[in-house]
Each structure stands twice: as C-alpha cells, then as structure tokens.
Amino acid sequence: MQTVPLLDHTPETIVILGGGPAGISCALWLKNLGHHPVILESGSETGGTPGQIDRPNRWIAGMPEITSLGLAQKLQEQCTVSDLQVLTEAKVLSVSCAESHNFKVTYSTSDGTAETDCAAVIFATGVRPRSLESVDSKDQEIHSENIELDPLGHLTGRTSHDGERSLVVGGADNAFFTANDLVNSGANVTLACRSLPKAQSMIQSQIKSHVDSGKLRVVQGSPTSFRQTGSSVEVEMSGLTESFTLEVDKVYLRLGFTPRFEGLEEILDNLKLTMDQQGFPQLDSDGRWCSQGIYCCGDLNRHEVSAVVSSLAGGAQVAKTVEYDLRRSK
C-alpha cells in the first residue's frame, strides 16, 4: 500500500507591526497555527483605533451592547488569555532580509534595543486621515483649532454646533456623515466635493433633503488657500468654472486615509516595497507584499472594506497565507 508523505512542523517567529484588530487577529491565528507571533505596537497599549474613540456598535454582528472602547478592551484581554507576546511603545529601527523568509528586525522599547530573527514580517500599522498635504493649496496659514482631521472629531466633547459656519471638504461617506451630523447639531454647513460624490446613496439622500430645506449647500470645488482672519478662516476655493471665497469658523477635511508609515519610510525604501498611486502597498489578493515574506493586513489592504470586521478577517487570512508559504518553502 502506498503511503502518504506528511510534513513535520517547525514553529517560526513572525513579527507583526501593529496591535490593532488586524494585528491581534493575525497573531491569534498564527499562534493557533503553531507559530510564535510577536506584536510590536508603537503606542502605549493595544486595541488600535477602537481604543481611541467612544462610539456605539452599529456594524459588528453579535455584539450589540459593545462600544468601540469595549471592543478595544476585549482585544487586549484576548492578548492576555491567549498568551500573545506584545511589546508596546516599540519603535522599529530596521528590517533586513538575508534570504526569503529570513529577517532580522531591530527595535527599541523602554527596556532598550533588541533584535528578533523571524520568518515573516506583517505590517498591520493601519491608516490615518489625510491632512493638508492632500490639498493643492498654495497657502496653509490656519490655526490647528480651526481645522479638524479626525473623522469623528466634530462631535468629540461637544453637544451643539449652533451657529457655527462649517466647511466640510470631501465626497465620500465620512464627509457626508460629518456634514449631516453638523447640520443636525445646529451648524451652517457648506459641503465641498472635489469630484462627483462617492458616498453611499442613503447618506447622499439625507444630504439632499438638507439642501432642499435650505439647511446646507453643496458646491463642487477644492480649497486653494487658507488665511486666518481673527477667529475665523478665509478659504479660497477653485470650482469648475470660477473661484470663490468662503469665510468659515471651522474646516473639516475628510479626504480619505493614507497608510500610517511614519518612521518606517527608510525601512520601506531599503526593502524596495512598491506602492500604488494612492500610496498604499501593492499587494496580491492574499496580502503578500513581496515574495520574500512580507505581508499586510487590515486597513492597509485596499482589497478589503475598511472596517473592524474586515480587519479581523484580514488578519486571519494573512496568518493562513503565512502558514501556507512557510509550509511550501520547506
């Protein structure tokens, strides 16, 4: 009778950069697949974006009572009960590749500098809102208190925006939801779309009803300069056929997101990792960034919907991909 060849298993160390939902999910799956994940988190605690906001859960099925802060706490508890190795306040200093699936990661923590040899490196650093650098502006003289980049910042710590003259810039969901929330809390809102809106039809319909009732106006145009005038901001706008000026109390930029690679730029250059036109990693459908053993999961993967549930699933998918690649490399 012919026998079937079976593989031996060699546990490998896998370094994960980022301790948000994607990074923790990936680490949990890698551990259950027989490997040794090490999470390097640049912040003081794990949990990612859910731990930085306090919002009710409307999107994650099966957990109707949990808030974003509660979710972050659950993720932190998962690290503890699953005995995942997590190093916080970790700054990655270098990543070198001797050969395929053979890396050395150098990093610093409050305990000093250390090195870890690993078979794969997974980027789960997440994204941040695009800032003024995304606006084709010749002048950016604007006080920080007059501009808001956080997609939920318009409601943080405030219950009313009565009388506020607000300019929201952007054409996707976050811009439309911000404009809607501001109108409902008493602001006088101008929504500036730089191109045709990409927001979902439901929120576009709500904005249309505000326009019809005179509570909001929508213009097509992009800021070209900001000038502080006392406590307000004078914004020069470039439209399709003409330029115009708006005087507002606050500007809400909702220009999408960019990868959170601050401090990692030289490392990415040295590894010769490629980006797409929007500055996101060029990945295959399974999250591989290069064939040598570098991967991405979570919001860095543009193949996925930007959401906690996608990040959790994406972390699991990349863990499976890593296990498959390591098995195949033997």
Image: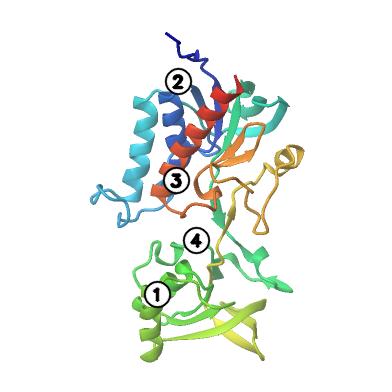
Alpha-carbon distance for marks 3 and 2? 21 Å
Q: Residues within 10 Å of mark 2 (few under 14, many from 20)?
A: some
Question: Which residue position is annotated with label 1?
Answer: 201
Question: Which residue position is annotated with label 2?
Answer: 34
Mark with earlier residue (3, 4): 4
The residue shown at (67%, 43%) is 263
Question: Which residue position is annotated with label 4?
Answer: 150
Q: Amino acid at mark 1?
A: Ser
Residue 97 place in picture, x, y as percent: 71, 28
Which type of secondary structure does the marked residue at label 4 adopt? loop
Q: Residues within 10 Å of mark 1 (few under 14, many from 20)?
A: few
Alpha-carbon distance for marks 3 and 1? 24 Å
Alpha-carbon distance for marks 2 and 4? 39 Å
Alpha-carbon distance for marks 4 and 1? 23 Å
Q: Amino acid at mark 4?
A: Asp
Q: Amino acid at mark 3?
A: Ser
Q: Amino acid at mark 2?
A: Gly
Question: Which residue position is annotated with label 3?
Answer: 311
- Above or below 278: residue 285: above
The residue shown at (76%, 38%) is 270
Q: Nearer the viewer, residue 222 or 145?
A: 222
